[in-house]
Amino acid sequence: MNSRRVAISSITFVFSFANFLIFYSYPFMLGDLNISGGIAGIVVGFASCFTMIFRLASGIYMDKIGGRYVMTTVAAVYIASFALLNSHIYQLVILGRILIGISLGMLSTILMFHSIASAQSNAHKGQGIALYTFFSMLPTCLAPYLSLEILHYDGPGAIVVVAITLSFIGLALAFSIESSSAKVGGHGNNSPFSLRDVVTTVGSRDICIALGSLALLYTISGTTVSFLPAMLESTNQRYAAPYFLTFSIAMLVPRLLLKDHMPISDVFPVKAFLGAAACALCGGMLNYWLLSHPAVLVGAFLNGVALGYIYPAISAYVICQCADHIKGSMAAITSCFADGGVILANLTLGVSALYYPGKFILLFPIVFAAGAMALFVLAYYFSVTKKSTSSLIASSVQ
C-alpha cells in the first residue's frame, strides 16, 4: 500500500475504534444520569437516522463542491461530540450522541471518497473499498471487550477520554493528508455533478438489483446485533460470546483476502453474489434450527462471510459502473441501502416479536436471503436474455 492509503486506513481504524467504544458504553453513560435504557435506544435510533441523512448529504457535497480540509473539519466536530458525553447535563449527553451520528455519517463517506479518489484504476478502487471496509470493521473484534473492561474499572468517563485520544490521532493524520494534497472532489471531476445522473444510475436494472439485494442481506446484521444476543443467552450461554467473535472475524476475512478480487467490470457477478447469498441462507437456517447446538457457530461463520464479502463487493461493483462525478453519492447511497437493511430487520423482527415470541422471528433472515438469491437469479436471466437478443440481431444483420 502507498503512504496515502496507509494513512486513510489508519484514520478509518482509529475513528471506527472510538465509535465502537462509545456505541457499547452509551447506555451506561445515560444510566449514570438515571436515564432509562428505552431513552438510550430512542437516542441511538435518532442518531442512526441522522447518520444515514448526513452520509448521503456528504456524498453529494463531495461530488458537487468538495474541499481541501473537509475531513479535518468533520473530525474536529467528531471530537467535540465525544467531549459532550462527559457532561453531567443529560441533554448535552444526548446531543453529543446525535452529533456523533451526524459526524460519523459524514466521515465514513468522506473516507470512502478519499479511498476511491486516489485510485488510478478500477482495480485499485476495488482494493481501496475492500480495505476501507476491513479497517472500519476491525475494531469490532476488540472494542466491545475493551469498552466493558474500562467500564468495570474506571467508568464511562474513562471511555470518553480513550475515544477522544484516539480521535486526536485521526485528526492529526487527516490534517496531514489534506494539507499536503490538493482539493478533493467538486470541480476536480471531468463533469459537473448532476442529481439526474444519480437517479438514472440508481434506477438502472443491475445496480438497482444489487442495491436491493444488499439491503435484504444486511438484515442479518440487524438480527445478529439486536435479537440473537438475548436468544443465545436464553438457550445456551456457552455459545453467546463465541458466536459474536466468530461472526466478527468471519466478516473481516473476505475483506482482506479478497481485496484484489472485487467485481469491477461491467458484467454482473452473478456467481459471486449468489455464493454470498447462499452462505447467508445456510447461516440463517443454522441459526433457526440449531440455536442451542454447537453447529450454530457455523451459522455465525457463514453469516459473517456473507456480509464480509457482499458489502465491499456490491460497493465496488456500483462505484466502478458509475461516472466519476457521482462516485461519492453512489458510495453513500450504497451504504444507506446497507443501513436500510439493518433498520428493516429491527422493524420487522421487532414488531413480529411482539406477536410471535420465540425463535419464529429468525425465519425472516432466511426469507430475506432467499429474496436476494431470487434477485440475483433474475439479474442472470436478464443478462442471458440480453445476450440472446444481441446474437439474434447480429445474425439478422449478417
Image (cartoon, helix red, strand yellow):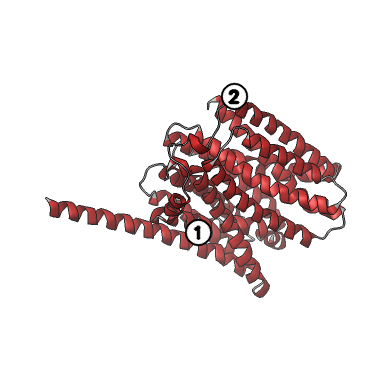
Q: Farthest residue toward the bottom?
A: 355
Residue 309 visible somewhere in the drawing: no
Residue 23 at x, y percent in the picture: 72, 49
Nearest-to-viewer mark from 1 and 2: 2
What residue sits 48% from the left and 44% below the top? 193
What residue sits 39% from the left and 52% below the top? 270
| Cα separation between marks 1 and 2 | 47 Å
Give me the disc on residue 180. 2
Please tell me whether residue 270 is drawn above or below residue 14 in the rendered image: below
Identified by mark 2, the residue type is: Ser
What residue sits 65% from the left and 29% below the top? 175
Residue identified by numbered label 1: 281
Identified by mark 1, the residue type is: Leu
Left or right position of 383 against 2: left
Left or right position of 195 against 345: left
Element at label 1: helix
What residue sits 50% from the left and 49% below the top? 310
Residue 305 visible somewhere in the drawing: yes
- How many marks the image carries: the answer is 2
Closer to us: 341 or 147: 341
Which mark sits nearer the N-terminus, 1 or 2? Answer: 2
